[in-house]
Amino acid sequence: MTSKPNVLVFFTDQQRWDSSGLHGNPLDLMPNFDRVATAGTHLYNAYSPQPVCGPCRSCFQTGMYATTSGCVNNWSAHIGEHKTLAHFFKDAGYETGYIGKWHLARGRQGAVEEELRGGYDYWLASNVLEFTSNAYDTCLYNNNNEEVKLPGYRVDAMADATIRYIDEKVKEDKPFFLFTSYIEPHHQNHRDDYPAPDGYEERYRNKWVPPDLAALGGSTQQHIAGYYGMIKRLDEAFGRVMDSLKSLGQLENTIVLFTTDHGNHFKTRNSEYKRSCHDASTRLPSMITGPGFTGKGQKREMVSLIDFPPTLLDACGIEVPDQMQGRSLVPLLKGQADDWDQSVFIQISESHIGRSVRTPRWKYAMIAKEGLEDEETESATEYIDAFLYDLESDPYELVNLVDLDSHVEILGKLREIMHRKMAEAGEAPSVIHPIQELRNGGQRIVVPNELETLDNCIDSPHRNGKINVGC
């Protein structure tokens, strides 16, 4: 057995945090996740730095905020010249592999040229998997850009490919870093539905609905049963992958991270499924287990997906490169992070320019005062208060407090945090206009709330006409 720990990332797409029983879901959708997280490290408050597919993936691969890497939207998603996790692991003597959805080569094609693959050695992937496959028609592309058809339901086909890769590397006695990127439970774009395995959608019809979706409606009743069925099969596949590690004697020598890119609000916060500051879009089901992470229990500190790349490198004894803007969780788990920053920063650069800060109690978000000002960075120089939620009394973000004079003081404190987080992310200084200031100045301001979302606020200048609903 190699002395270096293997690393496996099990990455899903568009999965709500509360699909896990550890977050109160009563339907037993994720018993394997719940069990492994309980025995390892459950990251209770994990958040996406970009609630949209391509930019979030760039954050994970590079460890950089989207505005730093320049990958700020789906239609131009790319890695560019930046080094990725694959490069850093490869330099440390690891075999690197990528299986599944990539979404970092611009466009909607499946095959990805070698120079656009982020440095991964083994390749079995599609750039935008939801456009090149269906639930029972999995099409990926190998190192030679040859089309590879895999049998079975798409989740199972990819899990089988993952197990084959692990088995091969174990036989070669080589440490591996394997990134497996599933499309489920993302919707199937050309049909706008959630195709569960045969017989699975029926299990979850007329079952439990999260309170935000129950209150706001959206496409929930049309889609959530299939969505649940997809998650159930994902968890079964996760269990099979963990079983393979156990049977190959690698369970104690493999760091396994389970997470996703963003959540799903089922058209309750805007006209599609994500790209909003709300926990439904930004909070992630996340756990990590293996060497250094076993038996650490549930951690309630605020963490971001951008913290995961330096964590994986640090846990393997690899120096964290200066380009990475997150913070390793290793000191936190060792009890050496008394000054841990209890806030996370979220950028939205597609559909509208927005920035958000989440603390243990508060959610604060702002939107650009004008339209998209900079096509390269999708940032703005002036912002307006847009959302404020007291998550202690309103955990599902149904009552927007941003326009209340009673909350002026907390808004001021949250703006200070926002300025600091933007500076840490490398963003240029911006002006944040308090909504009370604009209102008192005679400007008509439409304040979004649970029934009047950003897309419905006719006075909100956030829309740019470029939204890529498919991704």
Image (tube, rainbow, N blue to C red):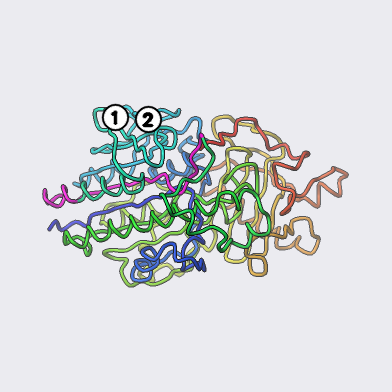
Residue 161 lies in the magenta stretch: no
The type of residue carrying mark 1 is Glu
Q: Which residue is mark 1?
A: 147
Instruction: Report the residue at 36% width, 69% height from top.
Output: 35
Q: Is residue 73 left or right of residue 455?
A: left
Residue 181 lies in the magenta stretch: yes
Residue 431, picture quadrant: top right
**Residue 100 % position (x, y):** 34, 41
Quarter of the image with the N terminus is bottom left
Q: Residues within 10 Å of mark 1 (few under 14, many from 20)?
A: some
| Lower position in the chain sequence, tag 2 or tag 1 | 2
Instruction: Report the residue at 75% width, 62% height from top.
Output: 407
Element marked by disc 1: strand
**Residue 427 % position (x, y):** 55, 42
The type of residue carrying mark 2 is Gly
The mark found on residue 110 in the picture is 2
Residue 204 seen: yes
Q: Residues within 10 Å of mark 2 (few under 14, many from 20)?
A: many
Element marked by disc 2: loop
Residue 275, picture quadrant: top right
Asked if marks 2 and 1 touch (Cβ < 8 Å), the reply is yes
Q: Is residue 142 left or right of residue 270?
A: left
Label 2 – label 1 distance at C-alpha: 9 Å
**Residue range highlighted in magenta:** 167-190
